[in-house]
Image (cartoon, helix red, strand yellow):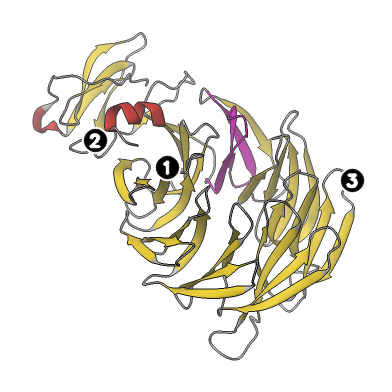
Amino acid sequence: MVAFLRRTSGRGGAGGTNSYCALGDVATLSPAGTWFAEGTTAGADDLRPVRVGQGLDRAPLINTNDGEPMETAISTIPVKGRVHDITVSRDGEHAYVALSKSVMVLNSENRVVAGIPLPDHATNLLMDADGKQLIVSRRGGSVSVVDTDIYTVRVLRDCVVSDVVVSPDGHYLYAVHRQTPDRGAADFVTAIDIASESTGFNIPIDDVAGLALNPAGTRLYAISYDRRAYYQYPPGRLIMVDAASGTVADAIAIGACPGSVTVGPDGTCLCVTHYDTRSVSMVNLATCTVRTVGLRDAPLGTVFTPDGTHVYVTNEHSLTVIDTTTTSAYELVAGDLPRGLQLSPDGKHAYSTNFGDGTISVIDTITNSITATLEVLSHPEAVAVSADGERVYVGDYWSRAVAVISVPMLRDLHGNI
């Protein structure tokens, strides 16, 4: 079904909560936020309910299964598999959806243009700088490269890979891996030339929890801690590696049990999450000093704003905004169980998927306020934003669907979004 959205002064169905539209109907939105059928287009045959929330703080879930260009504010596309991750090409022409054993490719008109079989489960997607190569990996599995022009797949490492990052020029891939699945096996950080598949360096670093690369591609950061320690919270380390030679340049102590690591956009600040101790380490990379920010919730991941002045933290039950200069923290109460978080390219809005209540929160990063809560899928998790900021892609692991949000249409309906 394709529904065309516009404002109207009319009223919806009884109670203002449900309307019944035939497939192909043209639906309109009343000021109260209800939908009703205004007319039908060719091909309408079946009736089914369309459920929407009261008011303009929620948008409806509109299904489009006919491959037509998107004309709805929120469109859903069923997929053949559970959605693990989503990324968008630099030019915004294609979105790539990681499924259990394949990658699905969507074009800008929401058409499924390809399904790429994979040798392993795909849980993480990375796009290189020019959009010609898609890096596909699974924690504890292999890492592969997909040619986005002809959709061929090459396996770079068929071993126990735990994390990967790609150099800004797309020439090198840096991976944390073990030679065997044995938990006692040593971790290695390896530089791999993507084109030739040759190894640049291979250095042992025990118990690596995460990798990050500075924007210049010159310095690699690995966080680690001794998982085999006999005490509850083993201390963490931040290891700094020269990305060209593989030489360990420095190592400093950070908080216990580090979980994820992110480098700021100018390369001067680094953020590490500590789930077990409910804290975040803010590292000044120029002075190698560490400031610990205590949280009221357990952090899962972080995203810096494009100007580097703030970092958004996805926690188990909430969101936190940290000022990178003062390290002051401000807690946001979003939806239930926030999981995925992405910022718009201009940094003015953040989009947080709420796994527990089937919504996505839209956050104004200037005022740090939630401007809209959109009803999307049943358990949204993965999220990606197109380079022009006009489309937001949301993946649902359990319902096997992808929602595509048209930001301009929502802005017309909701205002500041």
Task: Say which amino acid is labelled 3.
Answer: Ser
User: Helix, strand, or loop for circle 2?
Assistant: loop
Q: How far apart are marks 2 and 1 (CA)?
A: 27 Å
Q: Is residue 132 magenta?
A: no
Q: Distance between the residues labelled 1 and 3?
A: 40 Å
Q: Which of 265 and 95 is in front in this view?
A: 265
Magenta stretch: give its range. Answer: 83-108
Q: Which of the marked residues, 2 or 1, is nearer the chain's N terminus?
A: 2
Q: Which percent across, then down, holds residue 394? A: 46, 41
Q: In this view, does 415 lie above or below 244?
A: above
Is residue 9 at least partly visible in the picture? yes
Q: Nearer the viewer, mark 2 or mark 1?
A: 1
Q: Which percent across, then down, holds residue 63? A: 38, 29
Is residue 397 at least partly visible in the picture? no
Determine whether label 2 and label 1 are within 8 Å by CB.
no
Q: Which percent across, then down, holds residue 334? A: 32, 54
Q: Mark 3 points at which residue?
A: 196
Q: Is residue 220 left or right of residue 91?
A: right
Q: Which percent across, then down, holds residue 244? A: 84, 58
User: Helix, strand, or loop for circle 1?
Assistant: loop
Instruction: In the rendered structure, find residue 248 and report the number of the disc placed on it.
Output: none
Instruction: In the rendered structure, find residue 348 and report the number of the disc placed on it.
Output: 1
Q: Mark 2 points at which residue?
A: 52
Determine whether label 1 and label 3 are within 8 Å by CB.
no
Q: Which of the marked residues, 1 or 3, is nearer the chain's N terminus?
A: 3
The image quarter containing residue 226 is bottom right
Q: Is residue 88 magenta?
A: yes
Q: In this view, does 126 lie to the left or right of 322?
A: right
Quadrant into which the N terminus falls: top left
Task: Say which amino acid is labelled 2.
Answer: Val
